């Protein structure tokens, strides 16, 4: 009852402050900025400012992710190998570069990316509960998002100046940047289930966000690679990093500035902080209580969050491990790794569409099972058959397939997480969803680093990712049916909200009917 009362009070506050939030799909243009984009005479997302803000925030973070992964990461490995006294080019008369056994700061250069990914994973998992407490118990959600988006943008600046003399310091800055990015992600995701109360529209939103994020990556990669080719720096990893990070900085200034400066709205506290609790510990206590409540009362949710923890642990590490493997073992340049990421991103777009279509045809849980199956096959094939730079085209083709699976899974997971949340616990369980996806993100990089430092073939490290995906698949199978999961959390599955075989949405009709119902 207390949760319901808190939810109703919060709805009243948000209804008063945000006309769009009340029905979430109003086409009203009240309070829209003059620069608000339109398409075919109508405002994007029917004038839902926070829906557009979610898209812009995702674009900014996505561009930074691909810039850091494809260009910064490749250049960092090359510089670290030079600092360790290893060759970065094949000796005259040979086609392969000798294995690098040197170390820099106590580890192999090929372990540098996975080590800092592991550190980011551990620190993020520890801090996310505190961020959840700020979101739930204070009215500072938007303020926190603004601070983190500003820091996120500013920390990109030093990475533009990566070179042989400052690579370790800049790597530390990149580590902090990734950490801030995770905090920003947690704040942004708290808005997701509040964007709309219509299941099909939320399905379309998640598909749209995936397409926007990954589409922006494609455009970004095309611009960077095109600029490098025109300037004659195609094989210069440092120049590639400077260009990529400069453009990423400009994109984030615009995208995050608009999203957090003008579009995201304020939120009151979701719950009142008890007088005997501290904000510093409330998040961890709430996380523990939420986990206990899920374990005791929501069987399907329990298995879903376990599936997210194992599956996302693998996918968060996938880009870092693949880039490390291709840069170190297959000798890809930054530009070639950029094209590789581009193939993954290009696959994400049909993957998001696939998630949308299969979800309507079957249901979100079965759709996620299918996406995990594809990812397990992709990981196994990559580890078994890709060994040298001569397989460039095969690598790109396989990367596209992996991108389809990744876009499919992430779109489906976000939708499922929003659809099987008990009433009145949206922000709390979206925070738990994010924590689940992050809490084990350090484990696959740790396994890969241990394998690499032990001198075992890095192919075994890549293959180890499939183990986490397989466990996630088993957890999804143990969830049971989608209907059972919905019923279990008290959300009835009415014909008007079912995702099955629903081809289109008439937004204006829905808007008018909802206005009439409210009146």
Image (cartoon, grey):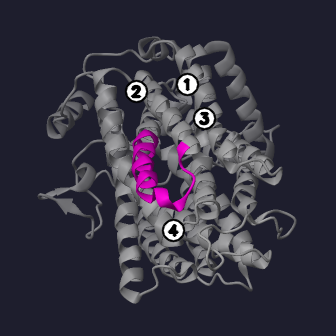
> Quick check: marks 2 and 1 in contact, CB under 8 Å?
no
> Quick check: marks 2 and 3 in contact, CB under 8 Å?
no
Mark positioned earlier in the residue sequence (2 or 3)? 2
Q: Which of the 4 image quadrants contains residue 6?
A: top right
Determine which residue is flagged by label 2.
367
> Quick check: marks 1 and 3 in contact, CB under 8 Å?
no
> Quick check: marks 4 and 3 in contact, CB under 8 Å?
no
Determine which residue is flagged by label 4.
67
Magenta stretch, residue numbers = 385-407
Residue 26 location, x and y as percent? 25, 44
Closer to us: 238 or 316: 238
Q: Secondary structure at mark 1?
A: helix
Secondary structure, magenta segment, majority class: helix
Determine which residue is flagged by label 3.
466
Q: What is the CA distance from the residue labelled 2 to the residue labelled 3?
A: 18 Å
Left or right for 375, reference 104: left
Q: Residue furthest front?
A: 93
Q: What is the CA distance from the residue labelled 4 to the residue labelled 2?
A: 30 Å
Residue 226 location, x and y as percent? 35, 77
Left or right for 428, reference 81: left
Quick check: 316 above or below 222?
A: above
Mark positioned earlier in the residue sequence (4 or 1)? 4
Determine which residue is flagged by label 1.
473
Q: What is the CA distance from the residue labelled 4 to the residue labelled 1?
A: 30 Å
Q: Which mark is residue 429?
A: none
Q: Residue furthest right?
A: 106
On the rendered image, what quadrant is the N terminus found in? top right
């Amino acid at each position: 009852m207390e949760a319901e009362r808190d939810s109703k009070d919060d709805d009243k506050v948000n209804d008063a402050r945000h006309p769009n939030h009340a029905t979430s799909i109003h086409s009203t243009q009240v309070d829209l900025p003059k620069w608000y984009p339109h398409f075919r005479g109508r405002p994007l997302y029917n004038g839902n400012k926070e829906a557009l803000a979610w898209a812009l925030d995702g674009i900014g973070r996505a561009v930074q992710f691909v810039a850091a992964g494809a260009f910064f990461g490749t250049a960092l490995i090359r510089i670290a190998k030079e600092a360790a006294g290893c060759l970065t080019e094949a000796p005259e008369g040979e086609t392969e570069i000798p294995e690098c056994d040197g170390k820099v700061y106590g580890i192999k250069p090929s372990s540098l990316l996975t080590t800092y990914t592991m550190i980011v994973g551990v620190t993020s998992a520890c801090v996310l509960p505190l961020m959840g407490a700020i979101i739930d118990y204070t009215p500072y959600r938007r303020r926190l998002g603004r601070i983190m988006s500003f820091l996120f943008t500013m920390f990109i600046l030093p990475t533009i100046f990566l070179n042989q003399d400052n690579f370790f310091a800049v790597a530390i800055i990149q580590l902090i940047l990734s950490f801030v990015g995770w905090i920003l992600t947690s704040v942004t995701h708290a808005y997701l289930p509040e964007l709309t109360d219509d299941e099909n529209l939320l399905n379309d939103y998640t598909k749209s966000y995936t397409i926007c994020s990954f589409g922006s990556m494609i455009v970004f990669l095309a611009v960077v690679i095109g600029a490098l080719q025109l300037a004659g720096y195609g094989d210069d990893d440092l120049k590639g990093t400077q260009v990529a990070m400069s453009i990423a900085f400009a994109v984030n200034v615009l995208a995050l500035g608009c999203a957090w400066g003008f579009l995201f709205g304020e939120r009151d506290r979701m719950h009142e902080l008890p007088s005997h609790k501290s904000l510093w510990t409330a998040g961890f206590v709430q996380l523990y209580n939420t986990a206990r409540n899920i374990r005791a009362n929501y069987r399907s949710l329990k298995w879903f969050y376990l599936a997210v923890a194992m599956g996302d642990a693998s996918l968060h590490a996938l880009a870092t491990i693949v880039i490390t493997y291709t840069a170190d073992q297959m000798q890809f340049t930054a530009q070639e790794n950029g094209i590789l990421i581009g193939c993954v991103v290009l696959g994400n777009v049909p993957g998001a569409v696939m998630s949308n279509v299969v979800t309507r045809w079957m249901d979100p849980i079965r759709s996620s099972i299918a996406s995990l199956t594809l990812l397990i096959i992709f990981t196994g094939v990559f580890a078994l058959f890709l060994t040298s730079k001569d397989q460039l085209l095969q690598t790109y083709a396989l990367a596209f397939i992996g991108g389809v699976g990744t876009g499919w899974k992430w779109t489906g997971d976000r939708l499922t997480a929003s659809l099987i949340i008990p009433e009145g616990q949206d922000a709390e369980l979206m925070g738990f969803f994010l924590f689940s996806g992050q809490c084990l993100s350090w484990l696959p990089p740790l396994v890969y680093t241990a394998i690499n430092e032990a001198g075992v073939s890095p192919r075994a490290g890549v293959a180890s990712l499939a183990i986490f995906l397989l466990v996630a698949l088993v957890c999804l199978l143990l969830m049971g049916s989608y209907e059972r999961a919905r019923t279990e959390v008290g959300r009835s599955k009415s014909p008007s909200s079912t995702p099955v075989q629903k081809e289109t949405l008439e937004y204006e009709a829905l808007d008018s009917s909802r206005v009439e119902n409210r009146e």
